[in-house]
Each structure stands twice: as C-alpha cells, then as structure tokens.
Image (cartoon, rainbow, N blue to C red):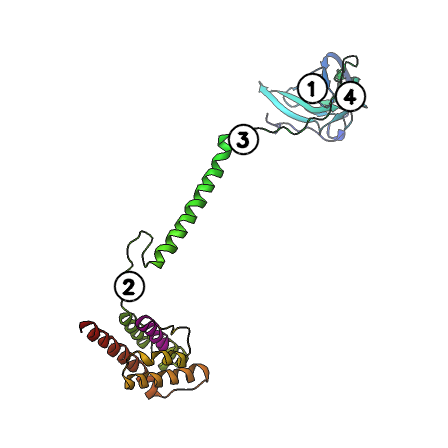
C-alpha cells in the first residue's frame, strides 16, 4: 500500500480547528483484528478504516506500547491509502499486536479527530474488539514426560561424498605427476618421456661469456659482477666437461682436480691467473686494471675453445 498520503495526518491536536468539536458514536465504527483468538506469542493485525471527503483532515490516536495490560503493540500505528475514488480517500490504520499471557482482553477505543471542510472537528470513536489468547492444553491424565532425544544422525548421501572423492583423486593425480616428473628428470627426460636435448657445455659457456661481454659491466664500474659471471660460466663448463664439482669448490680445489685432465700447462696457467684476479676482486676488494679486464673474456673463450677442440680430436682418434 502506498503510505504517502495525499492529505496531511496531523501529529498534534492543535493543527485541526477546535471551533466546534463533537463526539460521534456510531455502531458501525468498530476497529477489527485479523483473528479473534491466538496462541501465546502469535501476532495479529489491529485495523480501522476511515473515509475522508475532499478537503477533510484526520488524526488517528495511537494505542501506545501496551493498549491493555497483557497485550503489546509491535511498533507504531501506520496508515495506508486503500483507494481514491471521486475525491473520497479510503484509509486504513493498522498496528501489529502480540500477547504472552493467556486470557480474554478487550482492546480500548480508538479516536479519530476529523477536520471538516467547514472548520468543525468531530471525534470519531472506534470501539475495540475482544481478543482471546490461548495456551496449548495439556492432558495431564495421559501426558508422559520423555527424556531429551539425542542428536539425530542422518546417513551420508552420495552428493555429500562426491567432493571428497574428487579431492582424493586430485591429490592422487598431483602425487603421481610429481613422482613421474622427478623420475624422468633424473633420466634427462621431460614429463612426457621425451629426451631433453641440452646444448653442449662449450656452447652454453660461450653463450654466457658473450652475454657478459655485451653487458659492459667492468666499463660501468661493476667489476665484481663481471668476474663473478665470467668465472661462473667457466666453472659450469669445467663441471660439465670434466665431471668436476667446480661450482661447489674453491679455485684451489678445482685446479687440483684438473691436474690429471691432460690440459695444456700454458692454458691452465692463464686460467689460474684469471681466477686469481677474480678472487682478489670478489673477496679482497681489489680493482683490476683495464688490461686485466680486457683479457678476462678472451682468456676464458680460448680455454673453452681449445679444450673443446682437444675433445674433438680425442673422439676422432
């Protein structure tokens, strides 16, 4: 219902003229309840209907929070517009009631101050209905008290089990995939069992050294990073070429293992000089000369190429 009324429902008595005020008692003016009896705690609607002619105003009295002892009003009286025909306005006031005490209750009268178009004010009296509040009867002769029942356990349904089955299958698939990946990786194969083709050690080393050359690190004052990248590329090459744990060893330990690898002494000496300079730069804050910096990558490339070519010659023999 539309609660925005095209008339003004006055909130104070002074808004309506008080020149001539008459009390109108009419047997047809009765308020109503939606049911004449309820159980304790139930709710009902208490309503009254009012029709206003064009130009008339009205004020409906409020029943209060407790219209009668034992009956409570849940909120304020609200007014809805039912219809508007030929200028007449049909209104309905309503409020929700409840009770928590059994018994019979006569609801009080409701008053409506009606302002006529001629300036007079009439008081309309709406008689209150009778409300019966009942309790649930208990047959004490046959009534037997029972203990509180335990919690009801319903059987599992397939719909409840499906998510857990799906989670278990997903977990099993993840474990299987991880085990397969680890096993094939040790065999130098990808997840689908195909051999992983790796570049030869000398190609990997030369590519890394060329990348370091293009970065121009030592020219920009980054000598430590420069020598770190150069020696790391050589260590990785030595580890792959000669099966030496060069990445985890000190320079002295690495060269000690290279003694029996049939490397030209001059090539080994130039490599030692490079690693000595690199260790001083990385660990002793040494500043290498421009000549040492310029010779670092050519020395590393020469070592890689000559040892690789010797490997080719050995394989051809």
Q: Residue 21's image quarter?
A: top right
Numbered circle sitting on residue 48: 1
User: In this picture, is 146 found above or below 212?
Assistant: above
Task: Identify the residue at the far right of this view.
Answer: 69
Q: Which mark is residue 156?
A: 3
Left or right of 6 in this view: 266: left
Q: Are marks 2 and 1 in contact (CB under 8 Å)?
A: no
For the point 32% across and 86% down, which residue is it? 269
Q: Secondary structure at mark 2?
A: loop
Residue 58, image x and y in percent? 70, 24
On residue 21, the disc is 4
Q: Residues within 10 Å of mark 1 (few under 14, many from 20)?
A: many
Separation of residues labelled 2 and 3 (CA atoms): 54 Å
Residue sitting farthest toward the left? 316
Is residue 265 inside the magenta stretch? no
Mark 2 and 4 residues: CB-CB less than 8 Å, in contact? no
Residue 198 circle label: 2
Give 74 or 259, whichever is nearer the viewer: 259
- Please tell me how crowded label 2 is: few (under 14), some (14-19), or many (20+) other residues with Cα within 10 Å: few
Task: Write the residue at 19% across / 75% down.
Answer: 313
Q: Judge by depth and name the residue closer to the eye, 315 or 39.
A: 315
> Left or right of 242: which side holds 174?
right
Give above or below for 269 relative to 199.
Answer: below
Q: Magenta span covers which residues? A: 229-243
Residue 231: in magenta span: yes
Classify mark 1: helix, strand or loop: strand
Instruction: Compare marks 4 and 3 and give the one earlier in the sequence.
Output: 4
Q: Nearer the viewer, mark 3 or mark 1?
A: 3
Q: Of the numbered discs in the image, which one, if any, rests on residue 71? A: none
Q: CA distance from mark 4 to mark 3?
A: 74 Å
């Amino acid at each position: 219902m539309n609660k925005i009324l095209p008339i003004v429902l006055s909130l104070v008595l002074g808004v309506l003229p008080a020149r001539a005020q008459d009390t109108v008692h009419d047997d047809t003016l009765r308020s109503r309840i939606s049911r004449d009896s309820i159980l304790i705690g139930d709710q009902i609607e208490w309503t009254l209907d009012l029709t206003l002619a064009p130009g008339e105003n009205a004020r409906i009295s409020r029943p209060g929070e407790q219209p009668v002892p034992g009956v409570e009003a849940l909120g304020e009286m609200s007014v809805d517009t039912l219809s508007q025909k030929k200028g007449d306005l049909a209104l309905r006031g309503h409020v929700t009631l409840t009770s928590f005490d059994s018994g019979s209750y006569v609801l009080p009268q409701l008053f409506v101050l009606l302002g006529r178009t001629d300036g007079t004010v009439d008081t309309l009296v709406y008689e209150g209905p009778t409300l019966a509040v009942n309790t649930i009867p208990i047959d004490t002769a046959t009534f037997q008290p029972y203990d509180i029942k335990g919690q009801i356990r319903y059987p599992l349904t397939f719909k409840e089990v499906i998510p857990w089955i799906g989670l278990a299958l997903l977990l099993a698939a993840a474990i299987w995939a991880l085990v397969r990946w680890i096993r094939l990786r040790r065999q130098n194969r990808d997840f689908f069992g195909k051999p992983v083709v790796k570049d030869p050690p000398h190609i990997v080393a030369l590519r890394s050294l060329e990348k370091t050359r293009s970065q121009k690190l030592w020219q920009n004052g980054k000598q430590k990073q420069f020598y770190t990248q150069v020696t790391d590329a050589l260590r990785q090459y030595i580890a792959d070429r000669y099966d030496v744990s060069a990445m985890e060893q000190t320079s002295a330990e690495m060269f000690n293992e290279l003694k029996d690898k049939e490397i030209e002494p001059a090539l080994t000496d130039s490599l030692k000089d490079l690693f000595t300079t690199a260790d001083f730069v990385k660990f002793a804050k040494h500043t290498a000369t421009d000549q040492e910096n310029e010779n670092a990558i050519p020395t590393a490339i020469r070592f890689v190429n000559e040892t690789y070519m010797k490997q080719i010659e050995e394989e051809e023999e």
